[in-house]
Amino acid sequence: MSDKIAYARNGDIAVLTIQNPPVNALGHAVRQGLMERMDQAEADNGVRAVLIVGDGRAFIAGADITEFGKPPMSPSLPDVVDRIEASPLLVVASMHGVSLGGGLEVALGCHYRIAVPSARIGLPEVHLGLIPGAGGTQRLPRVTGVEVALDIMTTGRQVGAKEAAAMGVIDVVQDGDALENGLAYAEKLLTGGAKRRPVSEMPAPTAIDWDAAYDATLARGRGQISPAQSVRAVQASVEKPFNEGLLVERQIFMDLLKSDQSKGMIHSFFSERAVGNLPELKGITPRSIDHIGVIGGGTMGAGIATAALLSGLRVTMLEMTADAGEAAYGRIAGNLAGALKRGKITAEQHETILSQALNVITDYAGLSDADMVIEAVFEEMSVKKRVFIKLDAVCQQGAILATNTSYLDVNEIASVTSRPQDVIGLHFFSPAHVMKLLEVVVADKTAIDVVATGFELGKRLKKVSVRAGVCDGFIGNRILATYRAAADQMVMEGASPYDIDKALEKFGFAMGPYAVADLAGLDIGWAVRKRKRAEAGIEGVSTYADKICEAGNFGQKTGKGYYDYAAGAKARVPNPEVMDLIEAERAEFGSVSHDFTETQIVRRYMAAMVNEAAKVVGEGIARRPLDVDMTLLFGYGFPRYHGGPLKWADIVGLPDLLSDIEGYAKQDVAFWAPAPLLKELVASGKTFDELNKAG
Ligand code: 3H9
């Protein structure tokens, strides 16, 4: 008998308690146990009802995702749900914590459902590139109607108990303990003579315009197929008898399970959790952090301060002058007002943060008792060094001195202090209170508890933190510089920025690289190029990208860049002057132009990304391929359903990619030099994912 399901008698009620920590996922032993315990309850003299509850922090978080892709083991989850529903006994689910995916499907197989107010339900299978596969697409629409069921399935959102009750999914919402509530409810149902109420026997819901719903869902999915596929499964719940509808659902589920998109999304699910899990941090106690100093109140500094304030930390913001301090305060207050409007904080919390947790100063002495100081000043080594010398002089012993530099050498910055062991890079992405990525940049002398504190801060700020080593641009910006250069090469060879954006948006990026550049501001890259040329002693050169800026066009903020935004950001149209400038430059350099297909654009752009990513992993800048994948996913808009560049590379096949790269190298040997790690993997027939598993 499975020990995953405890069995107890309470009068005429059999209680089945699922015990599979941490979240009661429906692995094989749980499914087997539910079957056995249902048999036991039915054979148990005097039992009239079964109550199913979850032990620990959830009812059931769904199918066991770790079993996906492995050979299926009987009993299947659909069989378990059907078995529960078909029982001659009255079956009640009492839910607390989450009931997600297969967890909600088990509950829908029960005849009645009660939940505590904090319980949440949902069908998040779309986030794994799947649809519900244990009757959810057939039962939920019978309970809620088609529109509500489709909203839940296509968004994958979690719904609170009160809303779920209004939808008809939960019969009773009651405060208290799930077990006690469930027992009392089951007893009441029995006393009241309630009958079994199988959802499968309820009438089929009303039809909608299926093709319109399918098309709209497909368009919203930006290339992701599973949300639209759930429309087809729900359609079957209306058009076919229940059992045939189940077969349609099963077929779609099994097809999606084999798809590249579900492989990518399942990889993303586990990598998102594994990325902050570093063996060297096990058992290391982070330093305690309560008060953070932030230097520089521009967009980045204000965003960092906002994120810290929203997570309950005290923040002291240092600016150069009172006026700059006032402007910084205004930016933070604006961000907090946004958080209030979106319901992230209450009016009272908003008031307390502004009046008690935030302090704006202009004198370094005010940072003397900060536990950590993060500088977000101008991106120039001499400026950073001046800041760190001052911090070294005023900060208390043990304080962590962090730089938010996006590409400068953290070792060099640390070297100007007397305490390089306390110096670390914390690279936030703008806007820092919104973007999920945090690169924790570990310098040569950074102490291990300082690294642990970086990750702890990331957790507190609800970021996805990735460990990065020191190099120009760390993980993300280094790879970005390479794939942007590959895009620029293609422009010189005949692809327009608009062709490139279109191809990559079709691939799944929210925006192509040139649209992103317009959003970020073209003046930033222009300033960097000018500085680098000045440093190298080459002045007076001006590329087409410089010329766009010289005409005063910096992208969205000036209304024009690669695109013209006269009709609004969403209604962007190509700026006609740009192609003239590009043509002139192609002519000047005698470039031979040719057309690029969308596939060629994607292959080349991705090859550059993968090759540089493989170098970053090979050099130890990123620990594992999954660290790169998560960096690109959470900081650079990489489509989640491809899993990240290195998961994508595994899926398309490393030998083909290497051969593409060797082909491009015929034109530019230095830029396209294949990454040694990629060559090694191809030679040994291995994948990047095998390196993830090796730790
Ligand atoms: C499904 O049900 C398909 C069916 O329709 C049809 C089947 C035929 N399986 O996130 P956390 C692990 S598809 C295996 O850190 P939280 C997780 O990896 C499934 N493992 O905690 C982590 O492990 P570790 C539909 C799972 O409190 C640990 O539990 N359901 C599963 O922040 C703690 O997780 C979903 O998609 C699982 N289902 O969040 C729900 N769930 O400690 C997916 C979690 O080793 N899960 N783990 O890193 C979630 O959304 C969140 O984990 C949850 C808890 C909200 C439950």
Image: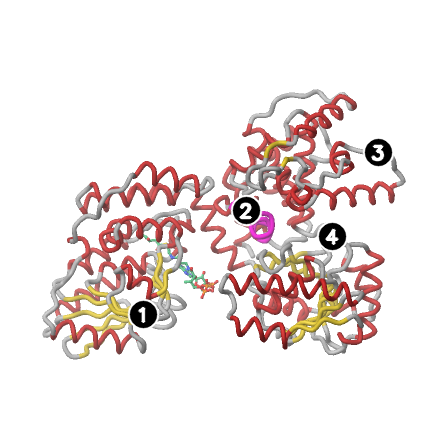
Residue 3 visible somewhere in the drawing: no
Tag 3 and tag 4, C-beta contact below 8 Å: no
Assign a secondary structure to mark 4: loop
Q: Bin the neighbour count of mark 2 within 10 Å (Cα to Cα): few under 14, some 14-19, many 20 and up.
A: many
Assign a secondary structure to mark 2: loop
Q: Bin the neighbour count of mark 1 within 10 Å (Cα to Cα): few under 14, some 14-19, many 20 and up.
A: many
Q: Which residue is mark 4?
A: 407
Gap between marks 4 and 2 measured at Cα: 22 Å
Q: Which residue is mark 2?
A: 644
Q: Is mark 4 within 8 Å of ligand 1?
A: no
Tag 3 and tag 1, C-beta contact below 8 Å: no
In the rendered image, the quadrant that contains the N terminus is: bottom left
Q: Quadrant of residue 257?
A: top left
Q: Is mark 2 within 8 Å of ligand 1?
A: no
- Which residues are drawn in magenta? 627-639
Amino acid on which the number 2 mark rests in the picture: Gly
Q: Quadrant of residue 423?
A: bottom right
Camera-side mark, 3 or 4 = 3
Q: Bin the neighbour count of mark 3 within 10 Å (Cα to Cα): few under 14, some 14-19, many 20 and up.
A: few
In the image, residue 636 lies in the stretch drawn in magenta = yes
Name the residue located 70 percent from the left edge and 27 percent from the top edge: 492
Q: Earlier in the sequence, mark 3 or mark 1?
A: 1
Q: Earlier in the sequence, mark 4 or mark 2?
A: 4
Name the residue located 69 percent from the left edge and 31 percent from the top edge: 489
Gap between marks 1 and 2 measured at Cα: 34 Å
Q: Earlier in the sequence, mark 1 or mark 2?
A: 1
In the rendered image, the quadrant that contains the C terminus is: bottom right
Q: Is residue 529 above or below residue 64?
A: above
Q: Is residue 266 above or below residue 219?
A: below
Camera-side mark, 4 or 2 = 4
Q: Which residue is mark 1?
A: 54
Gap between marks 1 and 4 measured at Cα: 48 Å
